[in-house]
Each structure stands twice: as structure tokens, then as C-alpha cells.
Image (cartoon, rainbow, N blue to C red):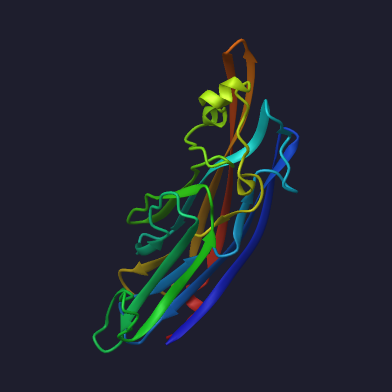
Amino acid sequence: MSDKSFPLDAYKEQPIADQVAALRLRLNATVTQLEEFRNNTFISIDFQGTDVAAGRGGKMSHDKKDKRGYYLEGVDISIRLDSPHYYVKIDGPQTTMDAATISSSSQLDLNLSLGTFGPVPTTGASSGMVIGSAFSSTIEDWRVENISGDVAIQHNYRMAACGDGARYNQPKDLVDMSAGGQMSGAPLHEVPHISIANMPLVSSGIFVSRSKQVSDVKLLVDATAHLAYVEKTFEVFDVKIKTKTERVTWSFVHLIPVSEVKE
């Protein structure tokens, strides 16, 4: 067996109004080659330690009862290789709803005697060796939608609740339109702190080649942050809501020198 890791630690910023959105990408790619699997090359990916901030320093341009923003309401992640010889075998996290702790497990159980591989048994009893990663992070008030396909890992992270637990699906949901809220002027709900600073991404996955590969490949990562601003005015039970949205896409190209890994 031979494996080798190729990490990437990158940081990018983008000004939005009077604040600065930022992405800290911590990515690890591990290439595994085994004599028992002469027809396959395995490339494991994980984003452990990656986070997105709507406002550097944890501050929004506006944070009052009638104006809030810009805050992070969504992040889309796309991960793929620039080679047609690989496919996505397993990835995580799976689609979750209102989970306080989101786990990302992308591991394969390799049966060295049979030359087969599949998900790690739920019993934890491996039939050979395990590759890949498993980790978790506390992501309160958010959910994840897994829309991965055969050639690309794709995860959509979405804000699911306001800071006080009120359900959130779109910017206007930040306005408290409950009976009690309207009696007090329909103030804006608070925004969860991770929607302003240090929203963790817990994506991971394993690409497997359809035949043994020795050529270097590039890992292509696109991260799109969705940011929102909400403003409301209130006059005699008439609530007027103004919203703005911004998108920022950061792209990364990470060379994975597969040729350096010999079985």
C-alpha cells in the first residue's frame, strides 16, 4: 500500500457593502494506491477546518431591529476532478434537516483478499482496511442538501432558522410577522452568529478511478456564498420589506500529483 496527502490552505476575501466576506479553505486530498486494487486509484477529499464568514471580524454593516445585513444565508460547494476517469463513490454529509451537529463520513472498507470495496459496515467491523475521513461540526440553525452526482460532489448549505429559532427560508422571513411581532413594530429577528462569522463546511468524499491512474489531476473547487440584507419600515400595521442579495464565488485549482504515489 502507498498513500500520500496533498493539503491546501487558502484564504480569499470579497468586499460586500461596508464589510468583507471571506473563505478559509482547508482542504486535504489523499491518494491511495494498493497492489490488491490494480484497477483502481482512490482520491479522498475532506474540508475539515474550512469556514465562511459573511463579515470579517464577525460584524455586519447593519445590525439593528430595522436593518440587518449582509449575513450569510447559503453556501454552495462543488468539487470535481478534471479527468473523465474518476467517479464519485461516496460523499458526505447527506441531506440533513435542523441538525445541531452535522457529521460528514466518507469512508470505504477495502477487502484486500477479495479486491472489493464498499461503505464501512455499521457494526464497525472492517473486512480489511478503511480509507477516507469522518468528522463532525456544530452547525446550529442550518441544514445541508446533498445533490452530488456521478462526477461531482455538490453540497448546498442553507440557513434554516433565525437566531431565536424562528424558521427561515428566505430573507423576508427575518421580519417578525407574528402577532406579538406586529404589536411591537415587526422587528427583525436576530441572525445566528455562524451566519455572520465562521460558518463551518464539513464536506468530504472519495473519487475512484475506473482503471489504474498514474497521471496527475487537478481538483476543481467552486464555493458560492449567498449573502442577504433585510430592511423594514412599519407604519400603522403596514410593514414594508426591502431585501437585497449578493453572490460571491471563489474558485480554486489544486494539483494532485498522482504520479508521486507508487503502490
Instruction: Spot the residue most to the top.
Output: 236
Task: Name which quarter of the figure residue 242 lies in.
Answer: top right
Can residue 216 be seen at all in this image of the molecule? no
Can residue 80 be seen at all in this image of the molecule? yes
- Which residue is painted at 52% across and 50% down in the image? 222
For the C terminus, the image quarter is bottom left
**For residue 77, above or below residue 207:** above
- Which residue is painted at 40% across and 55% down in the image? 152
- Which residue is painted at 31% across and 79% down in the image? 123
227 left or right of 90 in image: right
Number of dots carrying numbers: 0
What percent of the width, then of the height, locates residue 197?
A: 66, 49
144 left or right of 226 in image: left
What percent of the width, then of the height, locates residue 249?
A: 57, 43
Q: Quick one: 164 or 144, which is closer to the camera? A: 164
Instruction: Spot the residue most to the left.
Output: 114
What percent of the width, then of the height, locates residue 60?
A: 71, 38
**For residue 46, above or below residue 221:** below
For the N terminus, the image quarter is bottom left
What percent of the width, then of the height, locates residue 7?
A: 59, 69
